[in-house]
Image (tube, rainbow, N blue to C red):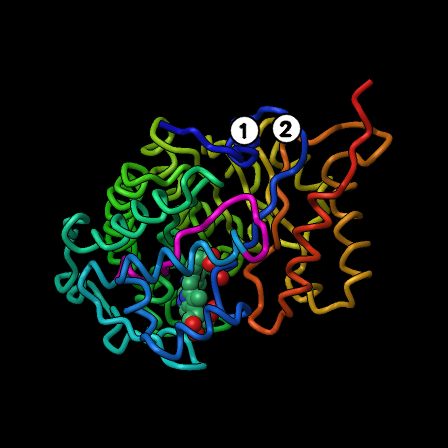
Amino acid sequence: MNTLKNDLLLRTLRGEKTERTPVWMMRQAGRYLPDYRILREKYSFFERCQTPELATEITIQPVEQIGVDAAIIFSDILVVPQAMGMEVQMVESKGPLLPDPIKGMADLNRLALPDVEEKLGYVFDALRLTKKTLAGRVPLIGFAGAPWTLLCYMVQGKGSKTFDEAKAFCYTQPEAAHRLLQMITDTTIAYLRGQAAAGADVVQIFDSWGGLLGPEDFEQLSLKYIRQIVAALKDEVLTIVFAKGAWHSLEGMAATGANGLGIDWCIRPQMARKLAGPTVALQGNFDPAKLLSPIPVIEREVRAMLDDFTGGPGRNAGAHGYIANLGHGILPNVPVEHALAFVETVKNYQYEPAR
Ligand code: CP3
């Protein structure tokens, strides 16, 4: 069924050598694109997510306008708490708001393990329509939030620098916390299975707040659940785990059997490779704020990043085991030409032929 014209990402995740490094950008479907901003004037955030035609159009914009090697479905990690029964609002220039957050064991009774076809079928519809519209141009990435990151929003009720209330919930009511994490995990497994069945070639698990936890807490509150998700999906779809700031646990993340691991810009590629071991693909790790540099600086820094990850021209490690990306989502104030320079520099990077 997969007759992709460009399958660089899939081959890299399978551990195969490719003629060049694949490139895409986290949060590539979004506010830095003028055409996205036009749709944003007309439709609310969740209308954009829930209308397959709109989600498809937004998903494909960066493929056509920036030339990335993969599409990521336009949706949000917070559609899962919504499907479990929580109200989620997206407040203009403030971000997400969950007005009735989880405070204790009793609140868990308000949550359901949803029938994902019924509650999230619109995401599957959007994936099917996107897959059809892409017509094999590039692979399609599905995604979900990691259980820990979703717990952060479900308990804190909004964004936070520290997610202190979410942590306090875990430290004072561990039984409720683990019950909630397991409910999210079970929902996420069914949800990502549905995404794979609807045409996602790869799924990425975003643990945006993994780095708020020390290594032991990360193991107990995050990795334990990510492990279950990866194990459940391993035979159905390629997987990427991105736990921002949790570089200390790259070894454990690699041991989940994920095909790719995302890393942010606060770790050197060589160190990440040492920790993750030789087989898993690494994805990252350009500082998103560096896309605000002048274009010649972007070009130079991207080439330096590629040298670091691949061994560099002349050292001929070649293009394998590496997916060029940012170390977190693209910022809304990045000029489109700068995003283009990022992608073009990766595509034009020359490898020495293997000796
Ligand atoms: O990567 C893509 O382009 C696909 C779409 C996508 C969105 N959100 C659309 C979106 C993806 C993969 C996400 C993931 C997501 N959502 C994460 C994990 C990745 C990360 O950046 O850490 C998180 C933590 C969220 C929760 C969320 N959604 C926040 C905090 C916000 C507001 C601030 C922000 O980062 O934009 C959103 C809103 C949101 N989700 C927007 C988009 C395009 C902006 C909505 C708008 O104003 O148009």
Measured in 3D between alpha carbons, the distance from the residue under mark 2 to the one under mark 1, in whole angstroms, is 7 Å
Instruction: State yes or no: residue 43 in magenta.
Output: no
Q: Foreground residue, 184 or 351?
A: 351
The residue lying at 43 percent from left, 29 percent from top is 3
Magenta portion: prevailing SS class: loop
Q: Foreground residue, 71 or 80?
A: 71
Q: Amino acid at mark 1?
A: Arg
The quadrant holding residue 40 is bottom left
**Count of marks placed on residues:** 2
Q: Foreground residue, 118 or 139?
A: 139
From this viewpoint, is residue 164 visible? no
CB under 8 Å between discs 2 and 1: yes
Figure quadrant, ligand 1:
bottom left
The quadrant holding residue 48 is bottom left
Magenta highlight range: 65-81
The residue lying at 43 percent from left, 34 percent from top is 238
Q: Is mark 1 within 8 Å of ligand 1?
A: no
Q: Is residue 277 above or below residue 304?
A: above
For marks 2 and 1, the one nearer the N-term is 1
Determine whether the residue tagged by mark 2 lies in a helix, strand or loop: loop
Q: At which x and y percent is residue 306?
A: 74, 43
Callout 1: few (<14), some (14-19), or many (20+) C-alpha neighbours within 10 Å?
Answer: some
Instruction: State yes or no: residue 66 in magenta.
Output: yes
